[in-house]
Amino acid sequence: EVQLVESGGGLVQAGGSLRLSCAASGFTDDDYSIGWFRQAPGKEREGVSSISSRDGSTYYADSMKGRFTISSDNAKNTVYLQMNSLKPEDTAVYYCAAALEARTSVFGVYDYWGQGTQVTVSS
């Protein structure tokens, strides 16, 4: 069974940076995508970014382009989300999720979810 474990959240001042990690395991083939999502209190969950396992193609939500970077280390089965120039409105629980198809954007179907990691950006 696919398992996902996020880490790297915390408290940071506005303008600072954090790197989130998503350790993934349990895939039976190489065709899958890992996405990052976030949910702030009282708001709906929104997609942040995704990366395809097969060719490394990436997708970013418009509001994250230029500030967030998704990457993967296939040897470690880990996907990272580097977040720079953080703003208080980036405060949310960040989740990584897995879709069992390659090249799945954050608007696709994600079948497995991690437990989430809290990111808090102070002003």
Image (tube, grey):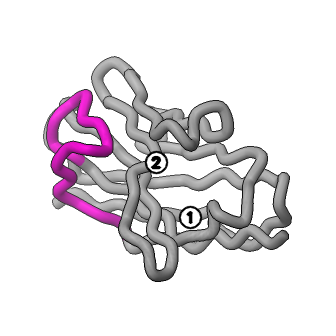
Residue at 22 percent across and 30 percent down: it is: 102
Judge whether residue 106 is colored magenta. Answer: yes
| Mark 2 residue type | Val
Main SS, magenta residues: loop
Measured along the vertical axis of the image, is residue 82 above or below residue 30?
below
- Residue 13: x and y, percent? 85, 65
- Residue 121: x and y, percent? 74, 68
Residue at 42 percent across and 63 percent down: it is: 95
Q: State the residue position of label 1.
A: 7
121 or 82: nearer the viewer: 121
Bounds of the magenta span? 99-114
Q: Is residue 44 left or right of residue 48?
A: left
Q: Which labelled disc corresponds to residue 34?
A: none
Residue at 28 percent across and 23 percent down: it is: 54
| Mark 1 residue type | Ser
Q: Secondary structure at mark 1?
A: strand
Q: Is residue 122 left or right of residue 77?
A: right
Q: Secondary structure at mark 2?
A: strand
- Residue 107: x and y, percent? 25, 44
Furthest residue toward top = 55
Residue at 54 percent across and 44 percent down: it is: 80
Q: State the residue position of label 2.
A: 48
